[in-house]
Image: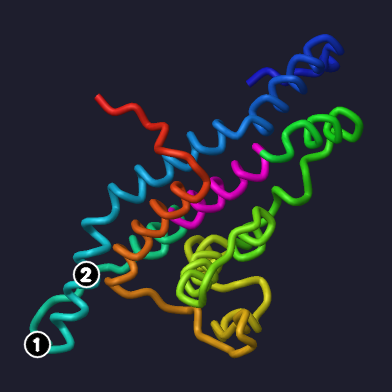
């Protein structure tokens, strides 16, 4: 492969910068990616359901063969990323002009659009939530940060899976169950309704 040693053309750099700002600071782009992630998660859903069904059956009959749980982490990670992008779309919709102006001046990506903390993002957009929703958001955040893609977190303390919720009490966020699939599907629809957005996916 031939190495490109030519310095970036200033005119093209302006074009790249403009295209970058359009990609980042137009809320519809975040929603398109959210739809893509949900579509991919949906493809995995039958396998995820089968994993949980076999686990339940195995507890009653040890002769029932278990199957690989590898799809679980990826499934919940994809759902987490989709919800993250929907929250960030709401932030972009609200703050697009400021983001563009700050980027033009600093060429830096907005700090508040970084990270995977769904509870923090929900609070930034003014979303209120009960303990049930907080439970889902915290468990999904864990999947996005490490559980869906790494064998362990960067901080070993996070392996405990215990977090303090808004009521001041610690709860476990290190598990998922078969019932969570339908809860998450409902959560995605609720968030779309709250944000006033529908799926942007055009299906044939």
Numbered disc total: 2
Q: Choose mark 2 or mark 1, whichever is in front.
A: 1
Residue that numbered label 1 is attached to: 61
Q: Earlier in the sequence, mark 2 or mark 1?
A: 1
Q: Residue at x 23, y 64 (%)?
A: 49
Where residue 93 appears, as percent x and y from the top left, is: 65, 37
Q: Secondary structure at mark 2?
A: loop
Q: Residue at x 45, y 47 (%)?
A: 192
Residue 55 shown left or right of residue 155 in the figure = left
Main SS type for the magenta part? Answer: helix
Q: Is residue 132 above or below residue 27?
A: below
Q: Residues in magenta?
A: 79-93
For residue 88: magenta? yes
Image quadrant containing the C terminus: top left
Q: Is residue 44 above or below residue 169?
A: above
Q: Which of the 4 image quadrants contains residue 95?
A: top right
Of 139 and 100, the residue lying toward us? 100
Residue that numbered label 2 is attached to: 67
Where residue 41 appears, as percent x and y from the top left, is: 35, 50
């Amino acid at each position: 492969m031939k190495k490109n040693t030519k310095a970036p053309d200033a005119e093209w750099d302006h074009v790249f910068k403009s295209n970058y700002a359009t990609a980042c600071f137009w809320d519809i782009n975040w929603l398109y990616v959210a739809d893509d992630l949900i579509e991919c998660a949906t493809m995995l859903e039958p396998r995820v359901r089968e994993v949980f069904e076999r686990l339940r059956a195995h507890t009653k009959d040890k002769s029932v063969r278990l199957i690989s749980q590898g799809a679980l982490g990826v499934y919940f990670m994809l759902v987490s990323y989709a919800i993250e992008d929907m929250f960030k779309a709401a932030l972009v919709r609200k703050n697009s002009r400021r983001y563009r102006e700050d980027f033009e001046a600093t060429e830096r990506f907005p700090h508040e659009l970084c990270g995977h903390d769904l509870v923090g993002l929900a609070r930034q957009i003014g979303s209120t939530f009960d303990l049930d929703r907080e439970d889902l958001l915290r468990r999904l955040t864990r999947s996005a940060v490490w559980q869906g893609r790494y064998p362990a977190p960067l901080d070993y303390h996070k392996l405990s899976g215990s977090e303090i919720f808004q009521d001041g009490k610690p709860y476990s966020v290190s598990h998922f169950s078969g019932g969570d699939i339908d809860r998450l599907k409902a959560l995605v629809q609720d968030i779309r309704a709250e944000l006033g957005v529908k799926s942007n996916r055009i299906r044939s």
